[in-house]
Amino acid sequence: MSSNASLITALIHEIGVDPGFNIRQDTPERAAHIDQLKESIRTVGLQVPLRVRRHHETYLIVDGHCRFAALQALHQEGAHRDGVQCFVEPGDSTTADHILTMLISDTRLPFQPLERAEGVMRMLRLGWNKTRVALHLGCSVKQVEYLIDLAHVPEEVKAMVVEGEVAPTVAVQAVRKEGPAHAAEALTAAKEAKEERKAKAAEAAKTPKAARAERQAKADAAPTPPPRPEDGAPPFDRETFHAMHETLRDLLRLTSVDLIHATIRDLYESLS
């Protein structure tokens, strides 16, 4: 296979991607990896040649999809010339050989378990048995069987694995125990129970001092009530108060209630 590959320099427009061949998923980690490769290639050039296979008059990527994406981005910016070093797979190599080459390639971005599971399933569909796959991947048959089970978990559970909510091994265990139809429900319930236990443990671990500090923080964050009238400045000064006192004393001598009300009203209107 790769030991007989020949090194060539191809033009970037002669290289393409076989749709659906790459087992990598479009994740934020992959996008960040491509950005890092882009800056590395811009600085020191392409250090590891692409691996390609002949396809009529062009070449298709076998290994190096991320490097090729970085090269394309640089080429569009005018920061990379056309020549790209590539190892060309022998003409007698098979599709299974190409998938194996991709799986065992030395890469700075390791394949995620779901991606490896997809690669194993492709090799099995091409006629390889579990023992042969394990031998070429350098792992045990039990590990291959685990990847097969992972490849068959329901899509809802796969989404939980991709989001990092559930570990791949836990997902496989749930499917084996609960069955495909109930695995997602069981995993969600287990996750909620775990979060509840963590919250209770955190609450129980609080010291009296920490609890008081938390209560004080909540009190400080509460909205401040409006000030009461007695909390503010007096509505009038001392001289005004004495004037009012004299006026009210004079009012006591009056016998007409209406006159008293009218006088009080005029007094307050004059002060306002």
Image (spheres, rainbow, N blue to C red):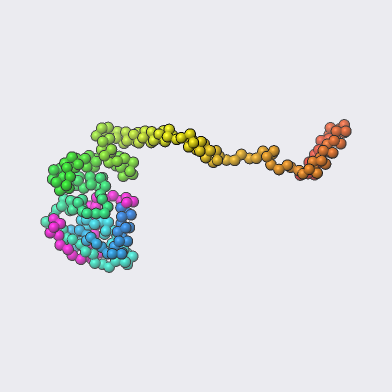
Q: Nearer the viewer, residue 155 or 237?
A: 237
Asked if residue 253 lies left or right of residue 47, the reply is right
Q: Residue at x 49, y 36 (%)?
A: 209
**Res. 94 visible in picture:** yes
Residue 205 picture location, percent across and down:
42, 34
Could you tell me which quadrant the N terminus lies in?
A: bottom left
Residue 84 picture location, percent across and down:
23, 64
Asked if residue 175 lies left or right of residue 87, the reply is right
Q: Is residue 165 above or below residue 257?
A: below
| Quadrant of residue 171 within the rendered picture | top left
Q: Nearer the viewer, residue 136 or 216?
A: 216
Q: Is residue 79 above or below residue 263?
A: below
| Quadrant of residue 7 within the rendered picture | bottom left
Q: Is residue 67 magenta?
A: no
Residue 117 picture location, percent across and down:
22, 45
Q: Residue furthest left?
A: 92
Q: Residue at x 28, y 64 (%)?
A: 44
Q: Residue at x 21, y 53 (%)?
A: 105
Q: Which residues are magenta?
A: 1-29
Q: Is residue 9 magenta?
A: yes
Residue 263 picture location, percent across and down:
83, 38
Could you tell me which quadrant the C terminus lies in?
A: top right
Number of marks: 0
**Res. 73 visible in picture:** no
Q: Nearer the viewer, residue 110 or 13?
A: 110
